[in-house]
Image (spheres, rainbow, N blue to C red):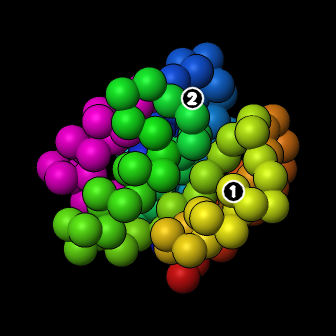
Amino acid sequence: MKGNILIVDDEIDLSVNMKELLEDEAKYIFIATNGIEGLEILKSHKIDCVISDVKMPFMDGLELIECARRLGLDMPFIFYTGHGSDELKKIAHDLGAMDLLTKPNFFNLELAVRNAMAS
């Protein structure tokens, strides 16, 4: 089932590459460059899956998922970061994230999105 995906990452080129990779998985793909922009999109559109970087200016990915959960938004979150660690993975899972993947592994990202959209 195709749904709307939100990509939140301050690396625009990477976001565009992810969008191209995931076009077949989605009805529509939104792109935000930080958590504040991402939160505004979450408030104003039905989003079925969020792919977010962790480290971004203004509001990071962990703050984004916390705000989304406080608003009662329960869509799958997949963190996609260049700064992965076991500790960060535990924190992400404790906040309700479905997965934490390390950049630039696009194959695992595509698979994680398919699993998220199927659930």
Q: Quadrant of residue 47?
A: bottom left
Q: Label 1 amino acid?
A: Leu
Residue 107 x %, y %: 83, 50
Q: Is residue 77 magenta?
A: no
Q: Is residue 24 left or right of residue 63?
A: right
Q: Classify mark 2: residues with Cα within 10 Å, few (<14), some (14-19) or many (20+).
A: many
Q: Residue at x 81, y 35 (%)?
A: 104
Quarter occupied by the C terminus: bottom right
Task: Kindly tell me whether residue 94 is visible in this rendering.
Answer: yes
Which label sits on residue 15?
2
Task: Kindly tell me whether residue 3 is visible in this rendering.
Answer: no
Magenta residues span 31-47
Residue 43 x %, y %: 18, 53
Q: Label 2 amino acid?
A: Ser
Q: Classify mark 1: residues with Cα within 10 Å, few (<14), some (14-19) or many (20+).
A: some
Residue at the spot of label 1: 88
